[in-house]
Image (spheres, coloured by chain):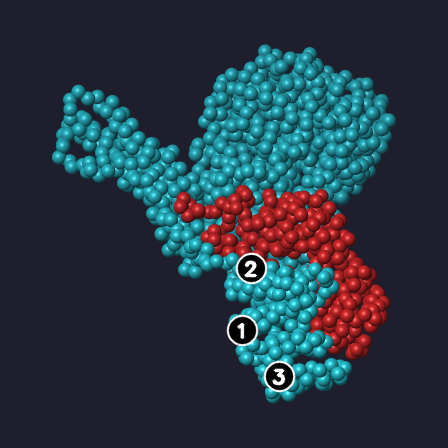
Chain colours: A cyan, B red
Amino acid sequence: MSFRMAALLESLLQREVELNRALDWLRGRHECEENGQDLQVRKQEFVPFLLNFLRDQSSNSLTHGPATPAKTPSTSRPLRAQGTSSERRGNRSSTGQGSRSTSRIQLFSPAANTSQPGDNPNELDNTLNSSHGSHGLTGISQFSSPSFSSGWSPAPRYTPSERRSAQRHCLADFMTSPPETQPSPTAQQHRGRRRMGPFGASAASRQTGARSGQMEEGCRWDGAGRKGRVAVKMNEPVSPPTQVELNFNNLDDFPPVGAAHVSPIPAKPSRRINPTPVSTERPNSKPKSCFTSTPLSQPCSSSPSIPETFGPGPSAASPLCLQEERELLKKERSKLAQQTSSPAKPIPGVCTPTRPVRPGSKVTPDPQAPGPDPAKVTHAPELNLLAEIYCTCISENLVPCVFLEVFFVLQLLTTRSVAPSDTMEQDPPVPGGKTDALERDYLGNVHNCVYFAVQVLENQFTLLSHLDRCTLRLLAENERVGVFSPGLRDLLVQAQDSCTSKVIPDLHTFIHSVPFQPATDNRTNFSSDKAFHIFKKQRDIFYELLREWEDYHKEPGWEFEAALGNRVRAMVSQLTAAGNHCHFARLFQKQLVQMCKGPRVLGSPGDAPDADLLGMLGADSLGRLKRLQERLIQPQALSGPCPPPSFPGNQEFFRDFLQTASCCQLNQHLKDGLCQQLLQLNEVSILGPEATSDEGEEGVDGDMEQQDEKQRYSSVLVVAQVLAKFLGFISFLPYQTSEAPSREIQEAAVTLRSKSAPVLDVCAVLRSCIHRKRTVLTIPWLVEFLSMLDYTGPFLPSYRDAFGLLLQFYRRMRLGKVGGQFYLNQMLLVATLGWLFQIPVFPDDLFFSMDLKDELKELENHTSNQGLDNLPLVDEQLLYTCCPYLGEFRKLLAAFVSGSASKTGGLIRKITPTSAEPRGPPTTRSQQKIHLDLEQAFFHNQPPSLRRTVEFVAERIGSNCVKHIKATLVSELVRGGEKTLRDGLGSDCVNAAKLNDSICAQLCDAGMQALEKATRFCSENAPRAVRVLLPEETSQTVLTTAESITTRLATEKACSWLSSNITTLIKREWKSSFERVIKTLPSPTSKESLNTEEANRSLQPPKSSSGQETGSFCPPDCNNEAPLASDVIVEIKEVLSIAVGPRTEEEVFTVQQIFSLLDKVEQTLKSRKFMSPVAEQMLLRCTVLLASKLVSGELPVVSSTETNRRALPDLRPLLEEFVLIWTRTPSAPLTLLLSELTLTTMLHTNDVQRCNYLLLIKLLIEKGLLKEDEVGSRWMKLSELSWPVESVEKFKKLSLASPSTVPSVKHTDILQVSP
Amino acid sequence: MKICRAEYKTIAKFIEQLRPTRQCMKILKDRFPNHSQSTLLSIFSLEYQKRMKRTLVKHQDVVEDYFQRYRSEAKKRPSDPVLLELANEVDLSPSLLARLLVERFLEEQQGSVSSKQVLNSMLKEPSLIPDMQLAKHVEQCTINDCCYGPLVDCIKHAIGQEHEEILREKLRERNLSFLDENHLRAKGYDKTPDIILEVPIAVEGHIVHWIESKASFGDEQSHRTYLNEQFWSYWNRFGPGLVIYWYGFISELDCQRDRGILLKDCFPTDIVTLCHGSSHC
């Protein structure tokens, strides 16, 4: 119960309770029995109370950055509870059903176990109320809408500070949403309702209640009354919307609170933030302030009282930009709403400290305001105490999200100076009695905030020190830290140096497609030809969509549904028709992994480059940093440490695709596939260092193997996270609703849905991973999966149990109790779980209400030694990849840096870096990069087993190589060293230490040849090994390439390890050897035959290996100088076109020209290299045609250009040439010569030409290329044709008509031309 | 030979007035002496085909008219190239006109529509046409036409084949091992570029998995079609690749290099291979 919490905190602050007792209690040592008050306080209740108290306290100071409301039940109403259990029920129903919608404001949702039937709140209220001399309001609260006012939140007295705090929660919520986002009227309402919802309403009603007896409150009683009526509805779970609209947009219901004149009790002006009306409904009514509004959430334009310049971002100055931005944000938000299915959740906050919250407002950072000053800190003892309690809560993982608290503390640290608070160091006395310990303004000024923050940071230094280098630097350079705690600053500086993180550049810049693999993709894998061909098209369409998305999705106004929707659906419906879902699902899943496994896409785009850029700049260039920061910080950049789940980068495409396709078959196949791959990945074996006692021995190459295992782990984890997110997305997609369902609906749904098996047995997976100590792999992806749950999902038994387990696990995962090596493992788990507990889908009351059976202990008891959790697997890069929101610290601090620059004047102009990312890779890539790309590319179209083999062999060879070097080189060196040592020690005047050093140095120098040896070892062994392992049918080139890649990989692996470790290795070996020798010194035996020769040999540099033999180049075989068929055909065509005309007189050919043409034909036909059968046939056909045009005289031929054109050339040699060609290539269509067309032509020619024709035929018959009877039968047909009789006669006369005697040698005409 | 878009437009504009005859080709060559004959012919062919596609319907509507005109002309002066003249006059490809008229002729003779196959064979082998005079005129048309007709089709086919072979030859010279379409079909690939390299290479800094040979000029329209029907499909299956337009292309089209489609107008010289031993390459 909150009042008890309040009492506890109060008594702590007043030193009535020993701090240590409380801390012990928090740490779980014993229950806290409060003096006399008999308050059995539960931690689950105290912690949220404390968190809310701190948020309250700082509400005025924190004017920047996204809000950090913890998802706590809002015990925040710091003071006495009122109301009956029936009220509580009512409240619960409202918060329960609308948990999501109210979570941010209604921080206080009743925890199941907090409402104990034994309570008698009224009584307690009375007690407390009277004891504190406040207005007894119990009656009133009972009187006013019992079903409505919350048992958890109402404060009986409404001192301004309380009201402020009440408002503060709203504020906090609204701060998370970018103010410039001007929601559409409806959205606005929704938002308002959601955020402010029941809480705002109840606060208001309470407030009105509190003011009872004051004249101007009369009307509000009305309001309260109305609310009461509404509240009846509220018992039916659907009510929140009504209620809110009523409360919110009605200024009568919600009179402006900030307006001091309204309140008879003098408000503390300094604590007020001028609120803005929630809606534009009544722009002119009491524009100044409206209780329910907050300046940050509401569009400034809706309030005339707010100058135009008000705005969170730099663009505020330009209304146009603002408008544009709003449009964009609106879109963004609707997108977000769709993807997270939690539209109620705050959009990532926008504010940065540099943003003037409001000109003229009290919270405006005053440029002239002095910085925080340790001397001006008030209430230091109390702050210390609070800090200590707070830190204990953090350290004990009693808070839902450790990193949220860190963020909050950093916000306190970077809070802007609030000018008025300087003048207001003491709280004004509260009228009517002693100052309430909880009423004091502990965090009301910047000095106190910073003081408190630094206290906490000091306490949490270990945690901080594991953040990234850039954050640490920013923190160390933060002037406030320096002023308030030089010690902390020094620690931070030190921590920076030990920070090991390095950014590994992303080598793979281009997207790969999923390669076509005959084994899974060819015809045999499909049920029919049709299905196969349809899938062929589908693959292409899929990539076409992907490319289009890539090109356009960032353009304003582009929408997936509008642009691609129909095409997606058309394609998917074809899938159904062809039954290709499983094929497509596989393609989809592979492409998803391809495109989303890179760390780059995981972070929100645009974030990382800035941060990295900042990281590269050192402290020395702070000025540059500031300038850069000014350019780079986007107003929207700060999203808080717990952004709702999203689909960043390329994931967006896949999500949109699935949403648009909306195809249950596809989804089912995908679920199967994702589940399978996930569980496979989950089982992946990652080896720890071999557990040998010989620590010096194995530790060394253990390190190297560990490096590989680490990489494997992180790639597996990243892929698993993507798969899990999509599995969750698809699985819960059918249940997603934009609004949380009412309690009844939800219960019905739970009953219904708990009957069918969930897609993934989360509990079983979870138990198994805890049992087998594999949480560091499993939990991060499970969190991704669970983050996709729908509103009802968490209430299903299986998921509820899973949440319970996770909560238990989280509680046990105290970072303070972890060894250094595994700290980052735990940090990853704490960060991901903390995030899960804060995101919308996680039920608000769960964290503090879950009854935790300690199932874990049992699970952990049976744990085997083997497991991943005790391997140092997580490094900083992976941590930030998996938890990009940790980068928010850096952004917050960087924003502060740039903000402090503005002290000197006015607004900082921030430029939204629209083209911050370089477009495309630079034109020239280094050879090395090309080489690496080529290697990647090489594997792309090979069977996956090839890559696995190569990588495996490379890894083993590399590792063996190191062992080999150790066994040979190192031990030889050390033995040689031993000998030198013994020899040296033999002579008298020797300083053993000096000798030791010099030998050691020698050995280390000699050790450098290890690289050469390693190279040789790898190039000798790797090819052999790969060759044996690859299938026989692998082609030679592929084999050679695989061998050389393996060699390179192995060499690289071995050499990189050796080059950085060989010295250490030798030193270590030498040290033990030296010690051994020294021990045995008394008997320096020279008998020991050391194989000096061997040692010497090994000291000689090996001859440089000449590498592989030169491959023999096969000279390009024979001369392929023959003209191409196409060219020859073109040439003949030219000739033929002259033959068929029309032509000019000049267009004639000499016999020689035809000869040379024929020569080309002959060459071409001979060298068949480039010849296709079609071309060959056409070529031959052309020659036949040419011959016929030649004999018919259509082709104008002269013997030579000089001679008389009239003189007919002798064609016989040419004709013989033709026949020669056809003899060599016997498939010429010679029957063309006997075709009607030819014969007809011949009939119309003169005798010379006919003779030529007959000569040709004769030659052909002689060569056997034409058969006599064939010729005869063709000629016989002549008579059947309807030709002029005289023509036929003429021809017959020539050809002797008789088929049997065709050999026309007898014919005189022919003899004339024959020799 | 890369030609910038503006220049291509100039050429295309000039081509508008030309007919597909050897005389016109000569005019074209004289007008643009800096470009190779094959490039010009290829561009001419592309542009002329576009023109024909645009106008064919219009001609089909007046086949009857053409037929009657042909008849009367052929009667008047049987030995003149009347069909070719008609084609040039109405600006229709001689081969296409011949085809239309043969079709019309057969329809008249046989009273039924002839199959495509019959038409094709008659165009290829005019002596099959029952009317010898028409056959002669058809032959005249198909032989003179430098954009359409069986002869041109065959030449185009041959050019394509030859360049593929040239490509393979160059790859062999370079010791680059590859699978060609036949290998790929045998393995059951659904889309097959001319060449898939067994081991990828880098050309001018870009990874190349496959090579497609195009024995034509790459103009805007045909490139777009190829992209959609072939190149992207190859990319979708085999990753980035290279297209060689042996007769050149519009230089502006080579804009997808970073996305995995590289254009060249010849076999590339700047090739990086994955040879680890220094001696191999």
Out of A884 and A1036, give the one closest to the viewer: A1036
Q: Chain of mark 2?
A: A
> Residue A1059 at x, y = what percent?
37, 35
For image coordinates 70% across by 75% down, the residue present is: A1245
Please identify the quarter of the rendering in which residue A805 is found: top right
Image coordinates of residue A267 in percent, x first then y, are 75, 18
For residue A147, say whether it is visible. no
Identity of the amino acid at label 1? Thr
Q: Secondary structure at mark 1?
A: helix
Q: Earlier in the sequence, mark 2 or mark 1?
A: 2
Q: Nearer the viewer, residue A1 or A616?
A: A616
Q: Which element type, helix, strand or loop, lies under badge 3?
A: loop
- The residue shown at (71%, 78%) is A1243
Q: Chain of mark 3?
A: A
Foreground residue, A898 or B20? B20
Residue furthest to the front: A1204
Question: What label does residue A1123 carry, if any?
Answer: 2
Circles 1 and 3 on the same chain: yes
**Mark 1 — residue?**
A1223
Question: Of residues A960 and B76, which is closer to you in this image?
Answer: B76
